[in-house]
């Protein structure tokens, strides 16, 4: 595996970890309050979790089709998502 795919996979796996924590937090909120907002957040987090799982798997399985020129753009998207998830987790924990 090339270092580019390894970095992209690491970012996706980190995103998946944060999303797993958020699913647990919002799931507990929904179980306690039965409000619709935490339920919607669980659905959004699960969909993002699936997106990152498929992305990480594709980086491992399809390394031959990725060109090095697209790496900075894909990494930028992954890091932007990571930053957004870290901010969402921070806000949720406060």
Image: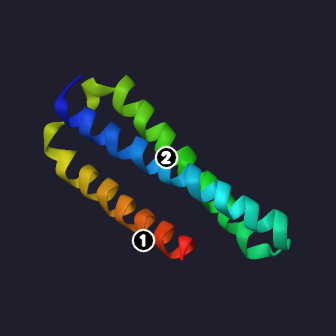
Spatial separation of the CA atoms under disc 1 and disc 2:
15 Å
Q: How many residues crowd mark 2 within 10 Å: few (<14), some (14–19), many (20+)?
A: many
Q: Position of residue 16 (x, y in %)?
A: 49, 46
Q: Position of residue 33 (x, y in %)?
A: 83, 73
Q: Position of residue 87 (x, y in %)?
A: 42, 71
Check the picture and name the quadrant holding the C terminus.
bottom right
Q: Is residue 74 above or below residue 80?
A: above
Residue under pointer 2: 16
76 left or right of 38? left
Residue 63, located in which quarter of the rendered image?
A: top left
Say what secondary structure mark 2 lies in.
helix
Q: Position of residue 41 (x, y in %)?
A: 66, 66
Q: Is residue 76 above or below residue 2?
A: below
Residue under pointer 1: 87
User: Foreground: 82 or 25?
Assistant: 25
64 left or right of 88? left
Residue at the left extreme of this rendering: 69
């Amino acid at each position: 595996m090339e270092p580019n795919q390894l970095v992209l996979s690491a970012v996706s796996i980190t995103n998946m970890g944060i999303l797993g924590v958020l699913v647990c937090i919002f799931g507990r909120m929904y179980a306690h309050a039965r409000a619709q907002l935490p339920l919607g957040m669980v659905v959004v987090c699960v969909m993002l979790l699936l997106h990152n799982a498929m992305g990480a798997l594709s980086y491992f399985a399809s390394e031959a089709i990725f060109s090095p020129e697209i790496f900075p753009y894909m990494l930028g998207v992954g890091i932007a998502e990571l930053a957004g998830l870290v901010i969402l987790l921070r806000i949720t924990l406060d």
